Image: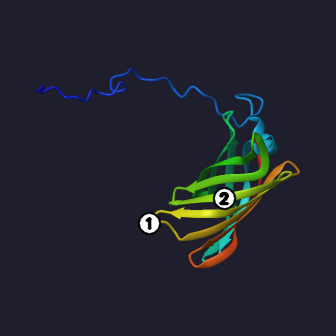
Amino acid sequence: MSDENPLQPPPWLNAPPVDSYPYEESHDLRVGPKLHPTLDGLLPYVGVWRGRGRGGFPTIEDFDFAQEIRISHDGRPFLFYESRAWLLDEQSRPVRPAGREVGWWRPVMDGDRATDELEALMSVPTGVMELHIGKRKGTQIEFVTDAVVRTATAKEVTAGHRLFGIVEGALLYAQEMAAVGHSLSPHLSARLTRVAG
């Protein structure tokens, strides 16, 4: 019987370092990979958007915020969504960082054709992930939650409803949330203008 270890080290264990990620992601349709044809109906959303909004909920005081949303693609049939917000004081000065969110939007396919139905995953660093089912009508999108998953320490969020629209070149949205014993209630709304893309 041999004393040699029958398990050999994996081939990547001593492999040389790799270069940086070799594939481009873009929020600007003039550069980078070509937009996947199944995303043509979502083309107006691709870009970097920045603006102001108002938030509130039955359990908190209303607040003003600024926000930047980046919607990008890497040539595959989904969009990457990233949002960063910060609170503003009465003079529109930044107070502190606020909500962050990342997610993916993708059209529901019928064979090799994109329908007007969408699926979206949205996650926040406070331990909540929402699965949304949506519908696109022109440049308007309506999402409703199909499922909400929470970590053991996350706030109790049970449902959500979101409307997005491109209106006169701006990105407008309104978001309702059901949480901590309250049914769907207005939570966030904002108007953002395109700053890149």
Q: Residue at x 65, y 73 (%)?
A: 57
| Residue 142 in the image: above or below residue 17 | below
Q: Residue at x 68, y 48 (%)?
A: 105
| Residue 136 in the image: above or below residue 80 | below
Residue 180 image position (x, y, % from top left)? 56, 76
Neighbor class of circle 2 (other Cα within 10 Å; few <14, some 14-19, many 20+) is many
Of the two numbered discs 1 and 2 on the same chain, state the one appearing first in sequence.
2
Pick whichever, 24 or 64, lies toward us.
24
Label 2 sits on a secondary structure element that is strand
Residue 21 image position (x, y, % from top left)? 54, 28
Q: Residue at x 12, y 25 (%)?
A: 2
Colour mapping: rainbow
Left or right of 16? Residue 190 is right
| Residue 84 in the image: above or below residue 88 | above
Rendered-image quadrant of the C terminus: top right
Marks 1/2: CA–CA distance: 21 Å
The amino acid type found where label 2 is placed reads His
- Which residue of the protein is positioned furthest toward the right in this rendering? 168
Residue 144 visible in the shown view: yes
Rendered-image quadrant of the N terminus: top left
Residue 185 image position (x, y, % from top left)? 69, 74
**Residue to which mark 1 is pinned:** 152
| Residue 112 in the image: above or below residue 96 | above
Q: Which of the numbered marks, if any, corresponds to residue 83?
A: none
Residue 58 visible in the shown view: no
The amino acid type found where label 1 is placed reads Ala
For the residues bearing labels 1 and 2, Cβ distance under 8 angstroms: no
Neighbor class of circle 1 (other Cα within 10 Å; few <14, some 14-19, many 20+) is few
Q: Which of the numbered marks, if any, corresponds to residue 132?
A: 2
